[in-house]
Amino acid sequence: MTIGIDKIGFATSQYVLKLEELAQARGQKIEKYTTGLMLDALSITPITEDIVTLAASAAQTILTDDDKAAIDMVIVATESGIDQSKAASVYVHQLLGIQPFARSVEMKEACYAGTAGLNYAKLHVEKNPDRKALVIASDIAKYGIASAGEATQGAGAVAMLVTSNPRIATFSDDNVAQTRDIYDFWRPNYSTTPFVDGIYSTKQYLDSLKTTWAEYQKRHQANLEDFAAFCFHLPYPKLALKGLKKIMPKGLDESFKSHLTNHFEASIQYSRKVGNIYTGSLYLGLLSLLENSQTLQAGDKIGLFSYGSGAVSEIFSLYLVDGFKEMLRSDRAADLEKRSALSIGAYEKLFYEEANLTEEGNAKFDTYDTGTFALEHIQNHQRIYVRKEHD
Ligand code: CAA
């Protein structure tokens, strides 16, 4: 029996900030973003779209009624949670109509937790091969107006259905993880935006990659040539490109090098237009690779590098299975073109709007475009979500 990813869904916001707009407002050359960071645009959420609505919308695109009857574990990985106590997955479980006898939890370790979620899901399905586990990585990356990280914000969720005999890719049992206690990026409870030691965080990302890869190679006698493609956590694609170059050994065959580089390009297509979605960004890279590569085939091995500040990193691999292309979409880029472009003023107002709570803990919001689900209002400090009628 094999275990792996059977379906992948994605949701992002209905609004976008084009980086030309940001460059002009912040007095930067556009090339700093398009070449220096390899980013073109960022998804921007209104207050009525949060990690719960994004997560539910991403999963909604892939689940059938049979899936909802078979799912007995719902994991939401996030570092932009909406409650310190109640798990986002509890809301998502209800919004999706998943059968009641399910375990629902939220997992956290910066951008890494989606990978931990997949590991937990794998163990669960190993013991219960007729059941399915839903793992959703959902985040809104918000650094603050005119902050160093502003051009690397974003919002989105990637939902993955983990099953036995999956139709996209199987997990290999080769995970190698590393933990190091550092302060490169963190968000204390009292702050709505993170504290970031930007350059230090990039060094830690690259050093975690180098050392985890060395350990992975040692444990598995692995070479880069074993892989058809490598996907990376994508805080911004340029950092991942530096990572790819770091693990390319000297003397690597030029045609293999260009093959890996082409696959890298395929893996960043969506992130270039969405920005950083923290926990989901590695998996958005995987989805982008699978949907945009013309040359991947069943049996190909794909390496993945997961990194969460703080920091935990992990390298593992997947094997593509026969017919994987049938489980994917070829028109996803067109959806991104449908987002409404925001002026700089509209972005600052929309992205940074806070709930104006009454003494009783009630708040109403203006109507904004969202995906299938929306946060309608807050009543007695309870978040009330709705499924929109037209969906
Ligand atoms: N044309 C072309 N390139 C240009 C340029 C121009 N006109 N102007 C600048 N650049 C290049 C720079 O040379 C630089 O490239 P290199 O790194 O290859 O030298 C790049 O654009 C960025 O320029 P700066 O370093 O001057 O950019 P910055 O001051 O805006 O800071 C950053 C970059 C520190 C990454 C900042 O965006 C940041 O703090 N981001 C948030 C933290 C982050 O993403 N860290 C990543 C690791 S942590 C992690 O992975 C977890 C996570 O998701 C947050």
Image: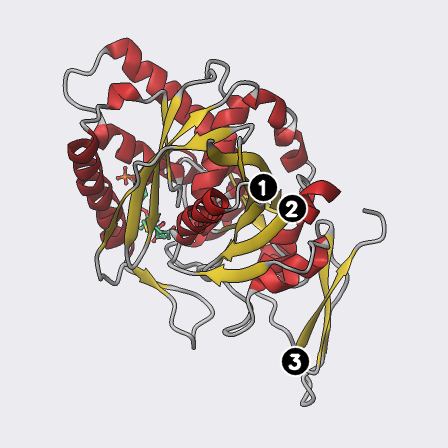
Could you say whether the residue bearing mark 3 is in a helix, strand or loop? loop
Q: Quadrant of ligand 1?
A: top left
State how far apart marks 2 and 1 are (Cα). 7 Å
Q: Where, by quadrant of the figure, is residue 315 drawn?
A: top left
Please report whichever mark, 2 or 1, sits nearer to the chain's N-terminal start: 2
- Of circles 3 and 1, the one toward us is 1
Ligand 1 within 8 angstroms of badge 2 C-beta: no
Q: Residue 381 has which mark?
A: 3
Residue at 15% over, 33% down: 218
Query: Residue under circle 1?
Result: 130
Give the crowd class for mark 1: few <14, some 14-19, many >=20 residues within 10 Å.
few
Could you say whether the residue bearing mark 1 is in a helix, strand or loop? loop
Q: Are marks 2 and 1 in contact (CB under 8 Å)?
A: yes
Where is 307 relative to 220, above or below? below
Give the crowd class for mark 3: few <14, some 14-19, many >=20 residues within 10 Å.
some
State how far apart marks 2 and 3 are (Cα). 33 Å
Rendered location of residue 175, percent (x, y) = 30, 40
Rendered location of residue 295, percent (x, y) = 46, 13
